[in-house]
């Protein structure tokens, strides 16, 4: 019988996270934002921190992580570039909703936030 130990699982998860961070980092560099000035290693580290933050909030699915990180990239790690970040934090940190619902609500709130300032 094959036995997989916790250390082996942890190693596989680290590799999976590193791959995800690399793919998301590459996409962010292509957006033309200030991330284009980051080195590959700096951006991968930044994305990795965001993945850890989202994992602590029970957000693990690839599409949800990607869409939320895209929005985080616009406003800062804790939405510090917003005058009042409560519109985002109240959604993303609400553990009563499924992660997919939070991702959708955050996207909608982001659009509403932009409309409020006539950015869209």
Image: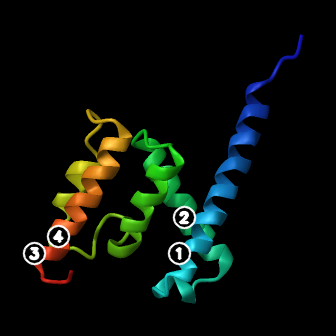
Return the mark for residue 12: none
- CA gap between label 4 and label 1 equals 21 Å
Q: How is the image coloured?
A: rainbow
Q: In the rendered structure, are the residues bearing label 2 and label 1 in contact, judged by CB atoms less than 8 Å apart?
A: yes
Q: For the residues marked 3 and 4, what is the alpha-carbon distance in whole angstroms?
A: 5 Å
Disc 3 designates what residue? 116
Whichever of labels 4 and 1 marks the residue nearer the N terminus, that label is 1
Q: At numbered mark 1, what does the secondary structure look like: helix, strand or loop?
A: helix
* Above-or-below relation of 100 to 24: above
Q: Which mark is residue 28?
A: 1
Tell whether 54 sits left or right of 118: right
Q: Quadrant of the C terminus?
A: bottom left
Disc nearer the start of the sequence (3/1): 1
Residue furthest top as drawn:
1
* x and y percentages locating residue 23 in the rendered image: 64, 64
- The answer to whether 95 is drawn above or below residue 34 in the figure is above
Q: Which residue is mark 4?
A: 113
Q: Secondary structure at mark 4?
A: helix
Q: Which secondary structure, mark 3?
A: helix
Residue at horizontal 27%, vertical 76%?
Answer: 81
* Residue 22, image quadrant: bottom right
Q: Nearer the viewer, mark 3 or mark 2?
A: 3
Horizontally, residue 31 falls left or right of residue 98, namely right
User: Mark 2 and mark 1: span between their CA atoms?
Assistant: 9 Å
Q: Closer to us: mark 2 or mark 1?
A: 1
Q: Residues within 10 Å of mark 4 (few under 14, many from 20)?
A: some
At 88% from the left edge and 16% from the top edge, which residue is drawn? 2
**Residue labelled with disc 2:** 47
Front disc: 4 or 2: 4
Does the residue at mark 3 contact the one at mark 4 (Cβ under 8 Å)?
yes
Asked if the residue at tag 1 contacts the one at tag 4, i.e. Cβ–Cβ closer than 8 Å, the answer is: no
Give 53 or 1, whichever is nearer the viewer. Answer: 1
């Amino acid at each position: 019988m094959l036995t997989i130990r916790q250390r082996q699982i942890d190693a596989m998860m680290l590799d999976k996270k590193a791959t995800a961070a690399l793919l998301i980092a590459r996409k962010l560099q292509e957006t033309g934002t200030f991330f284009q000035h980051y080195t590959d290693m700096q951006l991968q580290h930044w994305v990795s921190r965001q993945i850890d933050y989202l994992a602590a909030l029970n957000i693990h699915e690839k599409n949800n992580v990607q869409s939320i990180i895209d929005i985080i990239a616009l406003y800062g790690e804790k939405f510090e570039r917003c005058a009042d970040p409560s519109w985002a934090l109240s959604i993303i940190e609400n553990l009563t909703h499924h992660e997919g619902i939070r991702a959708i609500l955050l996207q909608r709130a982001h659009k509403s936030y932009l409309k409020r300032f006539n950015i869209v």
